[in-house]
Amino acid sequence: MTNPKRAAAHDQELVALFEGLDTPGVSDAMDKLGLHGQALGIMPLDNYARPVVGPALTVRYVPAATPAGTVGDFIDDVAEGDIVVIDNDGRTDCTVWGDIMTQYAGLRGIAGTVIDGVCRDEGKALGDGYPVFSAGRFMRTGKDRVEVGSVNTTVAVGTVRVAARDIVVADANGVVIVPRERAREVAETARKIEAVEAAIRERISQGATIREARAALGYHLLQRKA
């Protein structure tokens, strides 16, 4: 299946800035810059070997009306390479993502899904290698319990504000949301921090004590606000 919605050139440019970076490095850069982006309580479904990075397609769920509205048709509007970010108000009593959504997202080249709430049908996501990050797992359907309230509006996930097209970085350590307008600055800062940490690792591999290596390269100041 070909996704007719392609990633915009500017989105691809921002995503490329984070190539080779992971969430710990990005988190340290966010701390250095005084930005809050670490999505507390949102964890990976699997120990993914590589980070996933993409612009956020945000979805906000609300309690269902009578009759209930849609729970997943928005996915037809998600571009290749996007990460679906779902705000279900942290609800753990019903899911908003299951095997059909996983299959369809994978076929359309969607990069992953982040949920402030729970998912189900984990076997499909694990089997397909489709990255899912959530507050947990629970089998009960969200149909007739919740419905889509808005798409591409500002939402909250794990205490973090997420605007449409913010950059999501997610891996086995969790999820970090980078404000789109600060993406370049965050990536540059993360690379500087990683360069220092790589130098520390090199020194200790050659026999230096960790105290010596850290002191020589200013480790304790790396994520401190400038």
Image (cartoon, grey):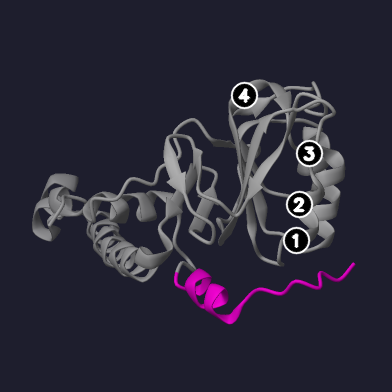
User: Do callouts 1 and 2 mark residues in contact (Cβ within 8 Å)?
Assistant: yes
In three-dimensional space, the C-alpha distance between marks 4 and 2, rounded to whole angstroms, equals 20 Å
Residue nearer the viewer, 110 or 50: 110
Q: Which residues are magenta?
A: 1-17
Q: Amino acid at mark 3?
A: Val
Alpha carbons under labels 4 and 1: distance apart: 24 Å
- Which residue is depicted at the point 80% across and 21% down? 140
The picture places residue 145, in percent across and down from the top left corner, at: 76, 24
Distance, label 4 to label 3, CA atoms, is 15 Å
- Looking at the rendered structure, the secondary structure element under dot 1 is helix
Crowdedness of circle 3 by 10 Å Cα count: few (<14), some, many (20+)?
many
Which quarter of the rendering shows the N terminus? bottom right
Residue 222: image location, x then y, percent: 19, 54
Q: Residue under circle 4? A: 91
Q: Which disc number belongs to residue 77? A: 1
Distance Cα–Cα, label 1 vs label 3: 14 Å
Q: Mark 3 = which residue?
A: 71
Residue bearing the label numbered 2? 74
- Of the image marks 1 and 3, the number of the one nearer the N terminus: 3
- The quarter holding residue 80 reads bottom right
77, above or below 87, in the image: below
The image quarter in which residue 122 lies: top right
Front label number (4 vs 2) = 2
Indicate left or right for 76 with 87 as reference: right
Q: Secondary structure at mark 2?
A: helix
Disc 4 versus disc 3: nearer the observer: 3
